[in-house]
Amino acid sequence: MNVVIKFSGNFCIPCQQLKPIFDDVVKDIPDIKVVEIDVEEHPDIASNYKVRGVPCVIVTDENDNVLAMKTGMMTKEQLIQFINES
């Protein structure tokens, strides 16, 4: 089962804009696990994944190997495509 991790921060306007899109998209994708991480609360986790900007969405496999990473705002269609192609 793949894991979709969304890194964001409360200070980040694009993160706030992506949140409802992200929530809408992931609820319709079966067989994924979703994790949301605030970079201010967990900078160590963000550093481990080499997150350099937010919002950042990462898809990993069940062994925590990064399959894909994308930073920046995405439309619903872009997010769906990103997750499905990872």
Image (cartoon, rainbow, N blue to C red):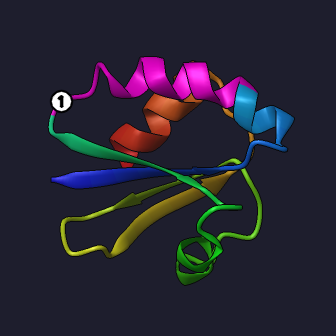
Question: Identity of the amino acid at label 1?
Answer: Pro
- Per the image, label 1 sits on a secondary structure element best described as loop
Residue drawn at x 35%, y 39% as measured from the top left: 84
Q: Position of residue 10 (x, y in %)?
A: 75, 42
Residue at 65 percent of width and 73 percent of height = 43
Relative depth, front residue between 84 and 56: 56
Q: Is residue 81 left or right of residue 65?
A: right
Q: Is residue 38 above or below residue 24?
A: below
Quarter of image, res 15: top right
Between 66 and 27, the one nearer to me in the picture: 27
- When the figure is inspected, residue 4 is found, relative to residue 45, above or below; the finding is above
The part of the chain drawn in magenta is 17-30
Find out whether residue 19 is within the magenta segment. Answer: yes
Crowding at dot 1, Cα within 10 Å, few <14 / some 14-19 / many 20+, comes out as few
Q: In the image, residue 34 lies at what x, y percent?
A: 34, 44
Q: Report the front residue among 8 and 22.
A: 8
Residue 31, image quadrant:
top left
Picture residue at 73% right of the left edge, 53% below the top: 54
Residue 83 on the magenta span: no
Left or right: 74 as drawn, with respect to 2: right
Q: Relative to 53, is 39 on the left or the right? A: left
Residue at the spot of label 1: 30
